[in-house]
């Protein structure tokens, strides 16, 4: 019955999307824009350490509004790690870590790639428009304003009061963005990020693009491949979105995203049970039943730990989701779950025995996980940016009906008991966003343009944030792509498997696409033998 209810709500919300028609991107043909070269200046990305002498930085001007190419400009912050073998330099490898809203500037310093890639390419990190150092999109004037608004919201609201206050805070947030963000809020869609990227490609002197995009960065890569198919030298997309679904129906995309987190959680609990304790601290007994009991307890009863910190359903869910992003966090998550289970059982017994007194690992579950990496220096009274919603609300169409979200939360949590409600309350600001997808210019397809060279698609079998089905769909939707699979519980895979990194190097350096149908193993065991 819950699935039928959810399907009915999805159909109703889809009808609300019909009147608004997303504007597809114009053809990338025609006379190319004349661009100036990047003016690089030597810099040290980490002033707290000696300057290695291999980095340059720049702020590259691009049009705020591409309909007015000679009008107002905004600056894109770029950082370059110069190729260590300049005599055999191929070109530039542009990098984007995802988000949306993730700062890519310091990704020029990444060690995820093999030495040969660093020898043959300049690694170029950049903050997309509206992010961190690149004219950050800001919905508040002070941190105090932001803190006061979000203090009214609950990450995973359950009670009627929590839902009401959270929805009101989200509505006021969208209003604050309309008031404070300025004209940039109308030009945050991925189509504009891709136009910026193509200008940067030309500005560094590359005839074709070499790019690696992670998570949301896969939407940048796939959009570029379809707007500028003849300009694709080598494009890697790792931790993939489903571009067709994401740009067609934001709610259905989010529902399937919640399902991806559940699949990843199931794999974690199953593998924990397989290896057992002590390799996995939470490995005793029925791991699924124990986890569900913790979650269900927290719906109505926050847990005060011996340290005085309090675990709520919101902090618990955000930390579990955060841990599933990386195999290195799974063993610590197991310890935290074990200690929280101990604390809950001890509260039921009204005392802790000597053997139960240590519940310190559970403290990690008492704080909200950070939403995104913010690397920009604090230069204003409001030190964050609001690019996450700036991009999502302009790319992903949502019905302008805030009242739908609490109803969907009830339906989704029946399908995805840990992450359904959590995901349903991620997007309410988009229902009243001042520059929504339904009335904004954005690229919504086609996705099957034949690129000059194949695109390399990478997907983890148990990726939480972008489930494996999304990688499979990405490969099918693109006009010229090969999928490589990694058997891992993690979000994104480059740098986590030596076998994969060899394929990545061959593809980037020699443009040798990987053989299709490969499933690789990660280098590390999340629960190594004691």
Image (tube, helix red, strand yellow):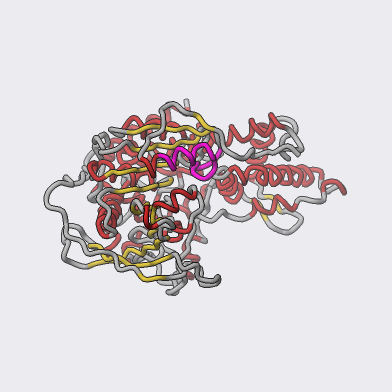
Count of residue discs: 0
Near-viewer residue (95 or 140) = 95
Query: Which residue, as the protein is rendered here, is positioned at the far front?
Result: 87
Quarter of the image for the C terminus: give it.
Answer: top right
| Residue 311 as seen in the image, left or right of residue 43 | right
Near-viewer residue (259 or 99) = 99
Q: Say which residue appears at 46% left-offset and 68% top-offset.
A: 53
- The magenta-colored residue range is 489-506
Tell me, yes or no, whether the highlighted magenta stretch contains residue 498: yes
Q: Is residue 248 above or below residue 332?
A: above
Q: Position of residue 468 (x, y in %)?
A: 46, 33
Q: Position of residue 357 (x, y in %)?
A: 82, 50
Q: Evaluate whether residue 13 shows in this view.
A: no
Query: Which residue, as the protein is rendered here, is positioned at the far right?
Result: 354
- Quarter residue 66 falls in: bottom left
Q: Evaluate whether residue 402 shows in this view.
A: yes
Q: Is residue 210 above or below residue 52?
A: above
- Quarter residue 389 falls in: bottom left
Q: Position of residue 185 (x, y in %)?
A: 30, 60
Tell me, yes or no, whether the highlighted magenta stretch contains residue 165: no
């Amino acid at each position: 019955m819950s699935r039928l209810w959810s399907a009915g709500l999805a159909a109703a919300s889809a009808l609300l999307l019909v009147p608004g028609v997303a504007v597809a991107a114009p053809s990338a043909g025609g006379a190319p824009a004349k661009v100036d070269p990047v003016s690089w200046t030597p810099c040290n990305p980490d002033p707290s350490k000696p300057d290695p002498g291999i980095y340059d930085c720049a702020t590259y001007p691009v049009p705020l509004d591409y309909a007015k190419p000679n009008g107002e400009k905004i600056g894109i912050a770029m950082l370059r790690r110069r190729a260590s073998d300049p005599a055999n330099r191929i070109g530039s490898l542009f990098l984007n870590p995802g988000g949306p809203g993730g700062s890519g500037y310091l990704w020029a310093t990444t060690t995820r790639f093999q030495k040969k890639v660093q020898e043959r390419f300049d690694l170029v990190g950049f903050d997309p428009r509206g992010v961190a150092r690149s004219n950050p999109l800001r919905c508040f004037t002070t941190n105090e304003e932001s803190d006061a608004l979000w203090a009214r919201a609950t990450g995973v609201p359950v009670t009627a009061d929590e839902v009401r206050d959270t929805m009101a805070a989200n509505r006021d947030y969208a209003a604050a963005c309309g008031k404070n963000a300025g004209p940039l809020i109308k030009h945050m869609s991925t189509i504009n990020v891709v136009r910026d990227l193509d200008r940067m490609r030309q500005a560094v002197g590359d005839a074709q693009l070499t790019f690696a995009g992670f998570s949301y960065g896969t939407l940048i890569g796939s959009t570029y491949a379809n707007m500028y198919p003849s300009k694709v030298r080598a494009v890697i997309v790792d931790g993939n979105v489903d571009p067709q679904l994401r740009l067609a129906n934001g709610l259905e995309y989010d529902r399937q995203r919640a399902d991806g987190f559940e699949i990843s959680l199931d794999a974690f609990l199953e593998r924990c049970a397989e290896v057992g304790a002590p390799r996995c601290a939470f490995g005793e007994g029925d791991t699924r039943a124990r986890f569900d009991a913790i979650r269900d307890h927290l719906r109505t009863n926050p847990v005060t730990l011996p340290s005085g910190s309090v675990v709520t359903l919101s902090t618990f869910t955000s930390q579990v989701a955060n841990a599933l992003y990386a195999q290195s966090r799974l063993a610590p998550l197991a310890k935290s779950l074990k200690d929280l289970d101990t604390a809950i059982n001890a509260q039921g017994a009204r005392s802790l025995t000597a053997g139960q007194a240590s519940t310190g690992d559970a403290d990690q579950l008492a704080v909200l996980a950070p939403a995104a990496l913010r690397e920009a220096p604090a230069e204003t009274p409001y030190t964050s940016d609001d690019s996450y919603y700036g991009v999502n609300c302009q790319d992903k169409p949502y019905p302008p009906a805030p009242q739908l979200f609490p109803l969907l939360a009830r339906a989704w949590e029946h399908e995805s008991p840990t992450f359904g409600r959590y995901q349903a309350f991620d997007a309410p600001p988009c229902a009243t966003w001042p520059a929504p997808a339904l009335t904004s210019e954005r690229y919504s397809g086609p996705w099957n343009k034949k690129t000059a060279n194949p695109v390399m698609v990478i997907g983890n079998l148990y990726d939480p944030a972008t489930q494996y089905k999304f990688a499979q769909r990405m490969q099918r939707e693109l006009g010229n792509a090969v999928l490589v699979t990694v058997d891992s519980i993690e979000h994104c895979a480059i740098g986590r498997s030596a076998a994969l990194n060899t394929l990545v190097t061959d593809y980037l350096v020699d443009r040798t696409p990987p053989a299709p149908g490969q499933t690789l193993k990660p280098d590390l065991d999340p629960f190594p033998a004691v």
